[in-house]
Image (cartoon, rainbow, N blue to C red):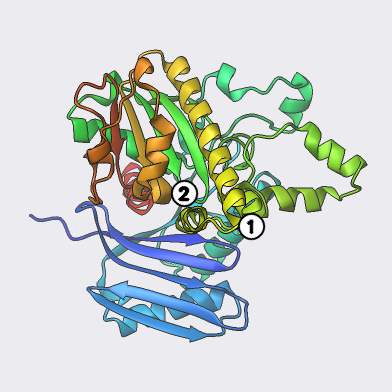
Amino acid sequence: MQRPVRTVLVINSGSSSMKFSLVQPDAGVEVADGIVERIGERESRAEVQFDGREVERRAPVGDHDAALRLAFELLDEAGGKLDDLGIVAVGHRLVHGGRDLYRPTIIDDAVVAKARELAPLAPLHNPPAVLGVEVARKMLPDLPHIAVFDTAFFHDLPAAAATYAIDRDLAEQWRIRRYGFHGTSHQYISEQAAEFLDRPLDQLNQIVLHLGNGASASAIAGGRPVDTSMGLTPMEGLVMGTRSGDIDPGIVFYLARTAKLPVEEIESMLNRRSGVYGLGGDNDFRELHRMIAAGAEPEASQAQLAYDVYIHRLRKYIGAYLAVLGDTHVITFTAGVGENDAKVRRDALTGLAPLGVELDEHLNESPSRGARVISAENSPTTVLVIPTDEELAIARACVAVLARD
């Protein structure tokens, strides 16, 4: 007998936005998606796509409760009635699970309280995600709600990679360690790379480069992560859209003592006004390239410096992970910048042929949007571009939880 179609509603809630997808994990397809953005502002925007039809509305949306109601209203208007879509669970992306929450978990009041308690470790991400959970649980009380944590994949990092060289007792008391983020994407991409190459996952050493507005790198040996660039919070590591990535921690003390900046202002600056935006004035790489090509000063020089710093840091991490892994079989680019910016991929890997990494310029410039090889035929390390699909990964995690429980 044929199994009924199962659909998972995946919700990703931000401070002023709410995204959702309706995913059928068995078939690996997304049947609907939508976003409500600028929540709480004078004019909000909502857009829903279902079965080839797109519905959009611009009107004030006061809070996340109203946002989710509007999303369902527009879905219905587009022809997608929730009761007819075979929804078996609601999956929620939660960024930080701390030490205790690392498996996909059915959400109850205790899980909500724990996620809220972890807010200081991910102040930009956990509070709005918890808000989204509360709204959805109230609106859809008869469905299981399942949390999938960004930190889960990196929970069992080797101690040498997870441990910071600070006072041991203090670190233990305040749960300070490398947690890593974008884990859902890194795990999904590493598994997709093995499937694409038709090779066993446990026989591949991989570097995954998740390059979006948030950016992270991971070293994965035989399917298990052995290092990752993000740390206690999502601020560490690569230069990102608005986040600084690695800095000398002394900068924080210097700004507090000498510039008399409050810690909260420094934190906001490092999260929201740094990275390529802080250096180049824009966090959209298309605009960055446009400013460089236009040559108008000082914008062009600022944009060029932002790009150069971004690439320099990225190359440092690639080189470090080549050393960590020793024999590296695959490097994969994913997420918005990684999938779409051929220049970033080229500049990140130029000159690495002596280390076994050689790009094919023609393949790299291909406009294809699917999974593909972009390395030279004789490159010892295969270089791939694979589109990430965190929503599908979350949906699959949800049905696995249902099967387990």
Dot 2 falls on a residue whose secondary structure is loop
In-image side of 55 versus 122 (left or right) = left
Q: Horizontally, is 378 left or right of 167 in the view?
A: left
**Residue 14 visible in the picture:** yes
Quadrant placement of the C terminus? top left
How many residues crowd mark 2 within 10 Å: few (<14), some (14–19), many (20+)? some
- Distance Cα–Cα, label 1 vs label 2: 21 Å
Q: Nearer the viewer, residue 297 or 316?
A: 297
**Is the residue 372 above or below the residue 355 in the image?**
below
Describe the element under mark 1 as helix, strand or loop: helix
Q: Which residue is drawn at 26% across and 53% down?
A: 25
Q: Nearer the viewer, residue 129 or 38?
A: 38
Q: Earlier in the sequence, mark 1 or mark 2?
A: 1
Q: Mark 2 points at which residue?
A: 212
Residue at position x 35%, y 14% from top? 327
In-front residue for pair 385/24: 385
Q: Quadrant for residue 338, please give it.
A: top left
Residue at 62% x, 39% y is 245
Q: Name the residue under label 1.
A: 127
Of 155 and 338, nearer the camera is 338
- Identified by mark 2, the residue type is Gly
The picture places residue 273, in percent across and down from the top left corner, at: 68, 54
Picture coordinates of residue 55, whole percent (x, y): 34, 81
